[in-house]
Each structure stands twice: as C-alpha cells, then as structure tokens.
C-alpha cells in the first residue's frame, strides 16, 4: 500500500487569489488521510501523517487547507456514493427540477463535473435535455454508465471542456455539487466552467458553508480532501476574477449547511437577487474579513476537545465501556484531533460493509457492523456522525431500550438519554 502513496505538497499562496497573506488559525495536528482505512495486514506498517491546518486569506477571505494530496490518490477509487444516502436523491431531484424550470430549453446540455454515480443527472430523466457526467473515479463512473448516464471518466479540466465543446456544444447549465471544495486548482476549474458555458449558461455550485462550519463547531469537516470552506464573499471574489457574476444564492441544509450559488457570464440576463445582496452584507457584519472570527472558532474548538475528552475519561475511570458510531472522514478527524485511541474507545460501528473489518486511520479502532451494539451492549456510543443524530437514535432504539446511551460530541458534549 505504501508505494501507492505520494506525499502532499504544501502551498504557501491562496489557491483562489494567489496572495501569500495567509494566516494559520487552527491546527488539528499531524493527521493521516481521513478515508485511508487500514487492513489488518497493514497494522504493522508505518502510517504517513500530514499537518492538518486551517488558513485564512487576508485578501479574498478564503478559508483553506494548504496541504495538497494529489487528487489521483484521493478520487480515482472513491468509496462515497451519492445514491446510497437517504437524503441526497431527494435533494438532487429538487435541484434538477429547479435548474430545468429556471434555466433550460428543449435540447439544452447539462454537464456535471464529479457526477459520482449519476444520481443528480438521472433526475433529469423524462425531460427534453441532454446530460453529460464527468467523473474521475473509475468504479463510480461505471455505476453511472450502467444506469444509462453518459459519463466521461476524467477530472473536469479545461481540456475536457474543449472536448465537450467540440463534440456536444456549449452547456446551458454546469452543476458542481460536493466537488468545488475538493479542488486544489480552483482557477483552472472555474476557467473550464466559464469556457464551457453557453452565452445564456449558468454555473451552479454547491459547497458547505463557512459560517455553518464556524457557528456549529464543525471542525471535523476539516480533512485533507476538503480544501476550501467558502463564504459567499470568497466565492464572489473568485468568480469576479473570471468574468463571472453570482446572481443568486440559497442556503441548503445538506452536509451540515451548504451554499448553492448561481453564476452567469458578467452582464448576463439574470438580475441580482436580494438574497445575494443580503448575504454579502451579513457576512461583512459577521466579520468575514476579520481574523477575530477565525481565532474565536479555534478557541471554541480547543475548549470542546478538553470537555469531551474529560467526559470520556471520566466514564472510563468508572469502568464504563465506550465505543463510537459512524466511521466517516469527519469521525476520523475528531478521533485523531482528540487522540481518542483504543484505551478510551473500543471500536467503531458503521453501516458500510466496505469499512467493516478495517481499522480507522490514525487511531486504528476496529470497524464493526452496527449489529454489534445490540450483541455487545457497551455503555456509551460516541456519535461521530453527529449531523445525523436523530436518524441514528431512531435506528438504534433497541440499544437505548437495553440501557445504552449515546454521547453527542458537539457543539456541546452531552449524553442521550
Ligand atoms: Zn485569497
């Protein structure tokens, strides 16, 4: 496994505006890649770790991770599949409907960079439009093709835009959900979209929202795959440099709170909405251009770590058993940052059969099926996927009825019931 690995590079300039006025405000410590689960046969091998730090750009306000792992390592063989989540297909159906009603004509071309298993594009079925996915993960692109979604197995880039232009013409909509924050070459990606947009075309971007991350203490959404935490202010500055103009914005609840922005060529036909103007003002008031808001977040994150670790140590010192629920990338950031190893947390349960039987990166907790909770009945289960607390509580009624308790780690550590 180790020779598959290439070291990340550290960038010292802002990946949006190129400024070197970057300030580090949160350090999560040396951290392995959050999705690189370990096989039993690899437990004796050394595991590479890399700094996991958050920086803020004083020029364009973009919040970012500056360690860059080559995308070929991260995204060529991807485990996350949109269609398997309960909430995403409904979210994508609503998005497809809105894009079609507002922006598409009969025969319009819709292109989706990082189209995953084709869940979003398949929501355009039954409409008189052409869809095309661009997906780098070979295994996931194959799933999309199997369901009939025309898919190019590549990273979205300027050369792919040229290829699409020459074979299919310009796109009336380019939709990038859950990818923009993972792209190191933000300017190249934005140029590629700009190049491919028809004169009336729109570029729709969905990404997790900086102020949700800050307000709800979602420090665990920081990992090496997640390079950018966007405010509307930072997105507007990026697009402006590429002669694109954001004309509308919506706040979405998915992924712990996201922004959906709609951009057009500068001077395009869509009027700028009040929602856009209001949110830009609100961010200004909240201090998006001021270091204090970021330092305050870092302080609250460190205080949270102290309180949660103290709670778990207290339970362990009474001889109580603690496990964890949900072996996600977020969960691994939390476990590693808080140094919650096997002495404090016995194992993790996770619904994904792909992860069961493996060990978490860094803390090396074994991953078992959630059935284990009922069989084993540990005293406490720390919920790592704490954005899904109510769903997990519903699914694990049996464990609770038998006396099991859950620990919700953030934004304030507490025990249920
Ligand atoms: Zn910048």
Image (cartoon, grey):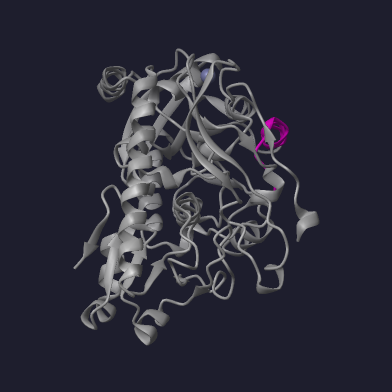
Quadrant assignment, res 376: bottom left
Residue at image location 46% in from the left, 59% down from the top: 340
Pick the quarter of the image with the N terminus: bottom right
Q: Position of residue 352 (x, y in %)?
A: 50, 70
Q: Position of residue 189 (x, y in %)?
A: 61, 31
> Would you place residue 384 above or below residue 198 in this image?
below
Quadrant assignment, res 416: bottom left
Residue at image location 34% in from the left, 25% down from the top: 293
Quadrant assignment, res 394: bottom left
> Would you place residue 244 above or below residue 131 in this image?
above
Most distant residue in the right direction: 3
Q: Position of residue 268 (x, y in %)?
A: 44, 17
| Closest to the observer, 265 or 61 | 61
Most distant residue in the bottom direction: 375
| Closest to the observer, 404 or 272 | 404
Q: Is residue 48 visible?
A: yes
* 69 lies left or right of 374: right
| Closest to the observer, 144 or 186 | 186
Residue at image location 69% in from the left, 40% down from the top: 8
Magenta stretch: give its range.
153-166
Magenta stretch contains residue 165: yes
* 195 lies left or right of 127: right
> Would you place residue 341 above or below residue 222 in this image?
below
Most distant residue in the front direction: 317
Pick the quarter of the image with the C terminus: bottom left
Q: Position of residue 283 (x, y in %)?
A: 31, 22
The dominant secondary structure in magenta is helix
Q: Is residue 102 visible?
A: no
Magenta stretch contains residue 83: no
């Amino acid at each position: 496994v180790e020779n598959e690995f290439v070291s990340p590079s550290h960038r010292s300039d802002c990946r949006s505006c190129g400024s070197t006025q970057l300030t580090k405000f949160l350090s999560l410590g040396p951290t392995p890649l959050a999705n690189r689960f370990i096989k039993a046969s690899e437990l004796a091998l050394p595991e590479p770790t890399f700094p996991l730090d958050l920086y803020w750009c004083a020029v364009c306000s973009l919040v970012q991770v500056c360690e860059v792992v080559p995308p070929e390592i991260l995204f060529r063989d991807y485990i996350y599949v949109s269609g398997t989540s309960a909430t995403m297909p409904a979210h994508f159906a609503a998005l497809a409907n809105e894009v079609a009603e507002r922006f598409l004509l009969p025969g319009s071309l819709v292109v989706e960079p990082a189209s995953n298993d084709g869940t979003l594009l398949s929501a355009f079925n039954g409409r008189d439009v052409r869809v095309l996915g661009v997906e780098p993960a070979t295994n996931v692109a194959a799933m999309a093709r199997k369901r009939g979604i025309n898919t190019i197995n590549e990273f979205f880039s300027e050369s792919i835009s040229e290829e699409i232009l020459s074979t299919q013409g310009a796109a009336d909509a380019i939709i990038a959900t859950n990818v923009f924050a993972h792209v190191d070459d933000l300017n190249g990606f934005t140029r590629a979209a700009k190049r491919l947009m028809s004169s009336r075309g729109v570029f729709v971007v969905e990404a997790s929202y900086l102020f949700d991350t800050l307000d709800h203490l979602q420090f665990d959404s920081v990992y090496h795959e997640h390079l950018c935490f966007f405010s509307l202010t930072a997105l507007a500055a990026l697009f402006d440099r590429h002669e694109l103009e954001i004309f509308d914005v919506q706040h979405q609840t998915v992924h712990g709170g996201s922004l959906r922005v709609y951009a057009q060529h500068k001077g395009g036909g869509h009027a700028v909405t009040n929602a856009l103007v209001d949110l830009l003002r609100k961010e200004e008031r909240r201090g998006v251009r001021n270091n204090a808001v970021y330092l305050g977040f870092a302080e609250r994150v460190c205080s949270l770590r102290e309180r949660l670790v103290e709670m778990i140590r207290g339970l362990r010192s009474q001889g109580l058993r603690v496990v964890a629920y949900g072996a996600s990338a977020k969960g691994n950031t939390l476990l590693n940052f808080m140094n919650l190893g096997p002495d404090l947390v016995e194992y993790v349960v996770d619904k994904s059969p792909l992860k069961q039987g493996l060990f978490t990166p860094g803390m090396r907790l074994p991953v078992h099926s959630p059935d284990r909770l009922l069989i084993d009945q540990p005293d406490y289960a720390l919920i790592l996927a704490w954005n899904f607390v109510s769903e997990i509580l519903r699914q694990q009624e049996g464990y609770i009825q038998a006396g099991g308790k859950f620990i919700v780690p953030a934004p304030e550590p507490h025990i249920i019931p």
